Amino acid sequence: MASTQRGIPIQQVDGTLDYCNEEVFRRNTLPPRSYYIPETALLLNGQWDFHYDSTPLEAPETAWAGEPAASPGEDWTTIQVPGHWQLQGHGIPHYTNVQFPIPVCPPFVPTENPTGTYRRTFHVPLSWDSTSQLRLRFDGVDSAYHVWVNGVLLGYAQGPRNPSEYDISPYVDRSGPNEVYVRVYQWSDGTYIEDQDQWWLSGIFRDVNLIAFPAENRLEDWFLRADLDSKYETGTLDATVSVTASTPATVRVVLHELSKNGGGVVSVTEGTLSADGKVDLSLSIDSPRKWTAETPNLYDVEISLLVGETTVQKVTQRFGFRKVELKDGLISVNGKALKFSGVNRHEHHPLFGRAVPLDFIKKDLLLMKSHNINALRCSHYPSHPKLFDLADELGLWVIDEADLECHGFYDAVARPQDIPEEMDYEERKKMTFPKAAKYTSDNPSWKAAYLDRMVQMVQRDKNHTSIIIWSLGNEAFYGQNHKTMYDYAKEVDPGRLVHYEGDPHAESADMYSFMYPSVEDLIKLAKTEGVEADGSFTKPIILCEYAHAMGNGPGWLEDYEEAFRTYPRLQGGFIWEWANHGLWKENPDGKSFYAYGGDFGDTPNDGAFVLDGLLYSNHKPTPGLVELKKVIQPVKVSVEGGYIILLNLHGFIGLDHLVATYRVEDFGESASLLDSGVLELPSIAPGTSAKVTLPSSALSIKSEKEVYLTVSLSLRDPKSWGNAGHEVAWFQHKLSGYEPSLASTALTRVSSPFQCEQAGAKTIIKGSGSSFVFDNARGHLTNWKAGNVSLLESDLAANGAAISLSFWRPPTDNDRALALPYWQRFGVDAMTSQLRSSSITSTPKKVQITTTAFLTPPILAWGFLATTTYTICPLGALTIAVTLKPSGYAPQDVPRVGLNIRLPRRLNAVKWHGLGPGESYPDKRAAQRVGVWAVDSVADLQTPYEVPQENANRMATRWVTLAEPHGRGLRAIAGDAASWSANCDRAFSFAASHHSAATIHAAAHPCDLAEEDATLLRLDAKVAGVGTAACGPGVREDLKVKVEEMAFSFVLEAVGV
């Protein structure tokens, strides 16, 4: 039968609620230990009884009487564990980035503090030793909770992403039913240091386990540490094992090969316990296979507790030999400096929030490896404990981060001062950070709470080889409590480095860390921050966050990568962030979408800032991830003369694991393979390059078309993260210098004379099966038919024009903060056209219409004087030549310059020669290849950003055709080179859609997009980059579309008619 012992009081300090007392964060919990769930464990996940209340005082009390209640009781329902109650019908999800969702008065929280009461019963398995110590373990509960077992208040804990474990042995009935009763509080004093740019979601969201350990003699904990000698050849395994033993006992440590490597014993050592219940053991290994992110070699370490000759308990821990250090001022592993190509990863699932299934976590890490990502920052808390097993096995450099952020104190300080966000960030920091730090980070009453966050992380995760850096948290300003955390980490685990971006002078960190600097500022930091007069430095620089991946972005990736490669002190960085955090929402009106801040009626909120990842919310790659894979590929390829030059950018391995193949193709109406084969690679050590001779067959090809060489490097054999043949790197090079003619054949064919008819304010031009309608009053073309097939349609939104000049496109997320209001201030989205003159000339071979119009917005006094010449060939070709001259108080830049063209919707199949298959922009095009591409529908061109925005541009286009399924349609090519000014891109851009720019701009979610009964084509002479201005630098100056004189032309011709 269960014990009748009394539990702890409901409050540690009488009169003060535990969840409003910063000095109370653990009550009656066992000491933290390395994560290990033995076979004698009962997983208590699944369906629990649940009661939801708006305040703790209304929550029900436990009524355990030795048997489960006959019925759940009034107002009780059920809930799934692990999970969040907001995602199971109780309360609402709430998103904020920086600001706190509650009043800022730490340690106090609102009276209305939603409270979830969980209840379930369990039986102790009869197969377990009846004398076992029984533990109840919670791996994650948000935000704080009290726990009862069989009516006895057993303990209290907070720190949601950290585990808590309780000894429940005295309170359990080992032969009958038992009840676990948990009261979870949405808000606690811990909330103030859990402000981590994510959804506020509550409840038991990680595993709950009942665990049995031997009662009298057991392994309590172990800490395995690796070291290498000065030559990085001989390895040492140091093990500290903590034991509870009632009799003299021995600890044995055996180092094994993995079973896949034969499982053989490598070395053995053992020792007896000291008076404090610990034993320190050491093994020395000659030339072990070393662990790196590129070579994740692991061993099994078997730790046994023996009493006499009897093995009482045995555990196995995966382990790798590697040495982490600062060497010559650089983060180094096994003597070699690292370069991080990393990402920040929050825990997220679109249905389950932070209750992420393990297979979903594994897919994340497999995607990282297959996209050339080598590093992971756990932002901004320790991840699911089993993630680190995967990182050890797959190979990732990991920064494990304490569950700590209090960014919201910035708003509490800045808003009353009315500090504008446009102010220089460093100036804002001076005005706010010291005051913000006084709330918690530099407040001694919070020291123990801060330290606990560090202790819990280090003790849980200390045996994972992949973790090379501990982080003190994120955006928590800087204060004395961080120093305490740093000191603890260095004392307990000197074999790892420590990171904290909030420490501006790296006083309590082993590296300088920055967020979102421009490339220019980053290079300046590399040259000056912590640099002595002689140019020396003792600490490196990393970017813990950069290249904010919100919506259509990020730009700048190649520029950052170039800086990392050029300045060794810049050891790479971590993209913000891995995935969007959208939560799938199905509205009563039938609309479904991935929700962001405000979609649940949550206020205050930070809107769509929760959608800023390289993956969509369903964790499928966005174009940003595809771009990143190309930019950070570990082999750089170039062509010099008759040679291919390969530079191995790996840090620890050669290229023997890769197969290099080549293809030579020419591109005309279609792609033709002219030559292909395998390239024999020499041995190329890390950081070195080698030449490979181009096959003579490739060099001897003659063609009147563009000829391209594509080199691909793929896995030779399967890896734990990728199949044989998976492409790791690629390169494309133009072999033929031939510039393809863009002249239309329809311009030169013999045809019958034109007929020009005046019909009121319209001119109708007919010839050889084609007809054009021109609006004389407004100066634009309204219709074109070829063979009675309509190719152009009147656009009422453009005053009836089928073809109109435009400088506007829908804004991206990166435009919204600065560029969009700037452009709108100049009326770029509201341009009107004033016809100044129009003339028509006709010859037997062509009709030429020339218009002069002033394109200008209401209210303002600037615009473009546009001269447009339409040249019509009777056999079905139309040339549109444009010159632009700006005047007045004009903006410095616009988002694009080109033509908007309205086509019949049936012209829906798209084929083009240019960059593809995906979208491309001037600062986001590295991942796209020159080729001939095709899609069956305009819809297939679109990028489904979860907040509708500018998308689907294709650059470097030679020609594009939009046609019906049986081929009738329209082709666009660039006009004669003489008609293009040097500041325009004759290898033009195009985009096609069924959604107007206004519709896209107005839509909150993809389900809001109403389709036009038309195909809307953009042909652009110039498009702007995308940048990262949602949080970081905007578009690079030379990649903006400057307001200046321009000239360009396009030729449209009918095809298949």
Image (cartoon, grey):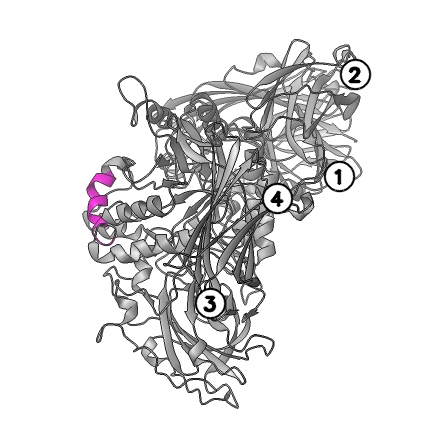
Amino acid carrying label 4: it is: His
Check disc 4 and report the residue beneath it. Answer: 994
Residue at position x 59%, y 65% from top?
Answer: 39
Instruction: Assign a secondary structure to mark 4.
Output: loop
- Residue depth check, mark 3 versus mark 1: number of the one nearer the observer: 3
Q: What stretch is highlighted in magenta?
A: 428-440
Instruction: Assign a secondary structure to mark 2.
Output: loop
Our reading of the magenta stretch's main secondary structure is helix
The disc, 4 or 3, on the residue closer to the chain's N-terminal end is 3
- Residue depth check, mark 2 versus mark 3: number of the one nearer the observer: 3
Check disc 2 and report the residue beneath it. Answer: 750
The disc, 2 or 3, on the residue closer to the chain's N-terminal end is 3
Amino acid carrying label 3: it is: Arg
The disc, 1 or 2, on the residue closer to the chain's N-terminal end is 2
Mark 4 and mark 3: Cα distance apart in space: 54 Å
Instruction: Assign a secondary structure to mark 1.
Output: loop
Amino acid carrying label 2: it is: Val
Check disc 3 and report the residue beneath it. Answer: 137
Check disc 1 and report the residue beneath it. Answer: 964
